[in-house]
């Protein structure tokens, strides 16, 4: 009898509190399930590896509202398991470029897995879970903006525009549970993408978003972030505010580095890093 030598891997599910869960997309990115009395919110959908509804249904069978933090592949890639989502329209161009492409999912797995989820056979095992189609049909989304709220019953998520990493990036504030779903506005390694002609304007936009989150910090204690560790203390917001402000006013300057799939100027402090002229 033939022996199956393929690695047995599964997505890790971690409970944050009594009604919030983190799902690790094979350590490539994070997404979250926030359960209310009437609905559950799925915040982001990963890179589109497998049909993530199976993991969500391990947590809840309530109707699902999908909330996207932004339009990059590794946050909306799993939308083929759902009918529609909420997303800021300023990321429409990213959504149209990233989402349909199965080839881009393949590239993401091949470049990120050796660094974030190293192991013999892991790349192949994840590639086998991609959709068979060459390209996927675009999904409909409901546009959201600053001040909108998503009502889950006994739980409300407030929308705050936090552009910088992408033009239409948003964060979701849960005042009741003192949680902030920050996507790629805050995690332990943030990218402000390099642009021809410079990206100071994008860094200024990012700094204003971080200032907004710090001004809101009395309303939350914990951040639920887009990559690596599922949670971070809100003090990290102040760290990113200091880094971005220092780069803009000239008191801080990073160094050029090439690490893994990233190359550009990076500055570090207290265990976090800000790539502010980055090709990735």
Image (tube, rainbow, N blue to C red):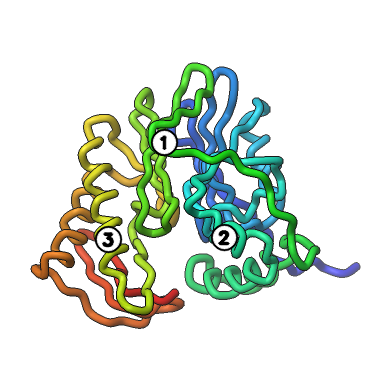
User: From this viewpoint, which residue is outermost toward the left?
Assistant: 251
| Among the 4 quarters of the image, the one containing residue 268 | bottom left
Q: Residues within 10 Å of mark 3 (few under 14, many from 20)?
A: some
Q: Secondary structure at mark 3?
A: strand
Q: Are marks 3 and 2 in contact (CB under 8 Å)?
A: no
Given contact means CB atoms under 8 Å apart, are the residues at marks 2 and 1 in contact?
no
Quadrant where the N terminus is found in the figure: bottom right
Can you see residue 144?
A: yes
Quadrant housing residue 166: bottom left
Separation of marks 3 and 2 at Cα, in angstroms: 23 Å
- Of discs 3 and 2, which sits in the foreground? 2
Q: Quadrant of the C terminus?
A: bottom left
Q: Residue placed farthest to the right in the image?
A: 1
Marks 2/1: CA distance? 21 Å
* SS for callout 2: helix
Q: Position of residue 30 (x, y in %)?
A: 50, 51
Q: Tell me which label, 2 or 1, sits earlier in the chain.
A: 2
Side (left or right) of 218 relative to 198? left
Q: Provide the residue designation for mark 1.
A: 159
Circle 1 residues within 10 Å: few <14, some 14–19, many ≥20:
many
Q: Which mark is residue 73?
A: 2
Q: Which residue is mark 3?
A: 272
- Counting from the top left corner in percent of width and height, residue 270 is at 20, 59
- Distance from Cα at disc 1 to Cα at disc 3: 25 Å
């Amino acid at each position: 009898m033939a022996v199956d030598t393929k690695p047995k891997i599964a997505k890790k599910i971690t409970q944050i509190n009594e009604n919030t869960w983190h799902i690790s997309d094979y350590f490539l990115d994070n997404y979250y399930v926030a359960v209310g009395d009437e609905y559950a919110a799925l915040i982001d959908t990963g890179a589109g590896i497998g049909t993530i509804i199976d993991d969500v249904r391990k947590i809840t069978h309530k109707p699902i509202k999908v909330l996207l933090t932004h339009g990059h592949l590794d946050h909306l890639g799993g939308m083929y398991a759902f009918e529609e989502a909420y997303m800021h329209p300023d990321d429409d161009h990213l959504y149209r470029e990233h989402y349909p492409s199965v080839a881009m999912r393949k590239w993401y797995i091949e470049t990120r897995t050796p660094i974030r989820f190293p192991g013999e056979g892991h790349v192949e095992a994840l590639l086998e879970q991609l959709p068979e189609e060459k390209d996927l049909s675009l999904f409909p989304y409901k546009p959201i903006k600053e001040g909108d709220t998503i009502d889950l019953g006994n739980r409300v998520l407030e929308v705050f525009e936090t552009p910088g990493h992408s033009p239409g990036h948003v964060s979701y504030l849960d005042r009741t549970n003192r949680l902030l779903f920050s996507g790629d506005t805050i995690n332990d390694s943030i990218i402000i993408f390099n642009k021809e002609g410079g990206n100071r304007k994008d860094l200024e936009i990012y700094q204003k978003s971080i200032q907004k989150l710090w001004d809101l910090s009395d309303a939350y204690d914990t951040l639920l972030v887009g990559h690596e560790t599922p949670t971070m203390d809100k003090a990290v917001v102040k760290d990113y505010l200091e880094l971005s402000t220092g780069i803009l006013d000239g008191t801080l300057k990073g160094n050029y580095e090439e690490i893994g799939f990233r190359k550009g100027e990076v500055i570090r402090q207290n265990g976090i890093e800000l790539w502010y002229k980055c090709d990735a």
